[in-house]
C-alpha cells in the first residue's frame, strides 16, 4: 500500500510544490489543494488514526493527473500538507471550538456549515466521520498551521494570479479535486457521475469555459454534472470574480475512475485517465483565449 512514512520535522516540509512552465504562454493556473501527503511527526501528535485512515480524506493523485500543466504553459500549484491537518480550500480561520483547549478569539468563524460538519480549516473528522484527535489542541497549533501552510499556499496563488493578469489581462484558475464513491456524485437509479464542474452556478467563471469543459468530457463518454453537490469551495468563492477578470472553475473527478479507494493505490487504468486529463489540459490552455480573451 502507498502509505507514506511519517516525516520527522514539519519545518523541513515545503508547504507546496509549484511546477512552472519553461515559457509561460497561457493565462491559466491549475491548483491541487487536497493532494498533499507529507505526514510529519509533529502533525501526527495527538492523532488517534493511522496515516492510511487519514489519507482517505485526500484528493489522492490529483496532482499527478494534472501534472502535464507546465508542458502546456500553465503552472500547477499543489499543497504538500495533508488536508486533514490544514485545509487550503477553507477560509483561514474556520475552526470548531470543541477541538481546542482554550477559548477561540471572537473573530474566528465557528459557525460555518464546514465547521458544523467537522471539516473546517483544521478538520475534526476524516471523510469516514471518525474523529482525528484523541486530545484537544491549543489554539496556538491552529495558528502555527495556518501561518506555516495555509498562508504561503494562498500568497503564492495570489501572486500567480496577479502575474498572469498583468501579462494577459485576465486569468483562468482550474481548481482540481476528486470525489469519493458512495453517493455524492450519484442519482438513485442512474449511473455514477464521473465529473462535477463547479462555477458557483455561473457566478465564478465565464459560462463558455464551463460549457467547453463539459463538452470535452462528455465527448470522451463521461457523465458530467454542474454544481451539484459541489458548486465550489473557498478557492472558487474567494478568487472567482469574472468582473475583475479572474475566472475559477472547480473540477471534481470520481476517484473510482482511477484509484482503489480502500488501498489508496492507482488502478491499472490510471495512465489512460491521466492521458485524457492531459488532453483536457491541452484543450483548456489552447482555447482559453477564445473563451475569455
Image (cartoon, rainbow, N blue to C red):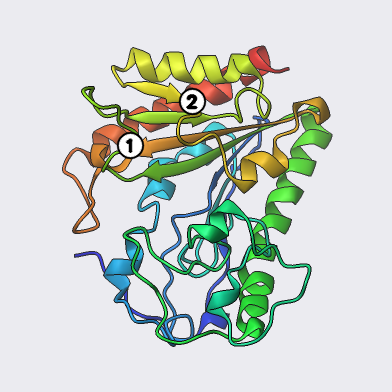
Residue 268 visible at all: yes
Instruction: Please give the name of the residue rendered at 79% of the width and 42% of the height, measured from the top-left corner.
Output: 162
Is residue 178 found left or right of 43 in the rendered image? left
Looking at the image, residue 50 sits to the left or right of residue 212; the answer is left
Q: Is residue 204 above or below residue 84?
A: above
Residue 169 circle label: none
Q: In percent of the image, x 54 and y 66: which residue is there?
A: 86
| Above or below, comparing residue 83 to residue 220 in the picture | below
State the residue position of label 1.
274
Q: In which quadrant of the rendered image does the N terminus lie?
A: bottom left
Q: Residues within 10 Å of mark 2 (few under 14, many from 20)?
A: some
Image position, residue 186 (x, y; %): 30, 31
Distance from Cα at disc 1 to Cα at disc 2: 12 Å
Query: In this rendering, is residue 32 above or below 131?
Result: above
Q: Position of residue 108 (x, y in %)?
A: 72, 67
Q: Could you tell me which residue is drawn at 45 percent across and 87 percent down?
A: 135
Q: Quadrant of residue 286?
A: top right
Quick one: which residue is furthest to the left in this view?
Answer: 268
Q: Position of residue 237 (x, y in %)?
A: 67, 40
Instruction: In this rendered view, identify the residue nearer to me: 192 or 78.
Output: 192
Instruction: Return the residue at label 2.
Output: 282
Judged from the image, the secondary structure of the residue bearing numbered disc 1 is: helix
Whichever of callouts 1 and 2 sits on the residue coming sooner in the sequence is 1
Q: Is residue 137 left or right of residue 193?
A: right
Kindly check if marks 1 and 2 are in contact, taking CB atoms under 8 A apart as contact.
no
Mark 1 is surrounded, within 10 Å at the Cα level, by few (under 14), some (14 to 19) or many (20 or more) other residues, namely some
Task: Please identify the quadrant where the C terminus is shown.
Answer: top right
> Would you say residue 67 is visible in this rendering?
no
Give how far across and how far down residue 151 sits, in percent.
69, 64
Say which quarter of the image contains residue 45.
bottom left
Amino acid at each position: 500500500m502507498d502509505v507514506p512514512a511519517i516525516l520527522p520535522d514539519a519545518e523541513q516540509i515545503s508547504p507546496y510544490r509549484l511546477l512552472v512552465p519553461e515559457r509561460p504562454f497561457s493565462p491559466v493556473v491549475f491548483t491541487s489543494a487536497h493532494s498533499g501527503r507529507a505526514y510529519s511527526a509533529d502533525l501526527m501528535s495527538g492523532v488517534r488514526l493511522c496515516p492510511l485512515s487519514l489519507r482517505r480524506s485526500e484528493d489522492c493523485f490529483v496532482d499527478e493527473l494534472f501534472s502535464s500543466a507546465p508542458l502546456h504553459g500553465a503552472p500547477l500549484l499543489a499543497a504538500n500538507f495533508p488536508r486533514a491537518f490544514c485545509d487550503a480550500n477553507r477560509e483561514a480561520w474556520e475552526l470548531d471550538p470543541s477541538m481546542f483547549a482554550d477559548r477561540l478569539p471572537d473573530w474566528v468563524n465557528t459557525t460555518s456549515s464546514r465547521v458544523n460538519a467537522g471539516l473546517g480549516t483544521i478538520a475534526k473528522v476524516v471523510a469516514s466521520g471518525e474523529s482525528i484527535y484523541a486530545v484537544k489542541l491549543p489554539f496556538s497549533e491552529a495558528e502555527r498551521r495556518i501561518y506555516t501552510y495555509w498562508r504561503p499556499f494562498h500568497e503564492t496563488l495570489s501572486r500567480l494570479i496577479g502575474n498572469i493578469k498583468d501579462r494577459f489581462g485576465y486569468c483562468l484558475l482550474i481548481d482540481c479535486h476528486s470525489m469519493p464513491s458512495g453517493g455524492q456524485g450519484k442519482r438513485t437509479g442512474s449511473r455514477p457521475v464521473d465529473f462535477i464542474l463547479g462555477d458557483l452556478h455561473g457566478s465564478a467563471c465565464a459560462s463558455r469555459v464551463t460549457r467547453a469543459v463539459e463538452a470535452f468530457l462528455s465527448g470522451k463518454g463521461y457523465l458530467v454534472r454542474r454544481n451539484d453537490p459541489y458548486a465550489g469551495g473557498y478557492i472558487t468563492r474567494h478568487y472567482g470574480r469574472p468582473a475583475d477578470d479572474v475566472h475559477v472553475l472547480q473540477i471534481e473527478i470520481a476517484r473510482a475512475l482511477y484509484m482503489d479507494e480502500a488501498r489508496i493505490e492507482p488502478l491499472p487504468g490510471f495512465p489512460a485517465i491521466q492521458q485524457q486529463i492531459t488532453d483536457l489540459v491541452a484543450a483548456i490552455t489552447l482555447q482559453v483565449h477564445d473563451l475569455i480573451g
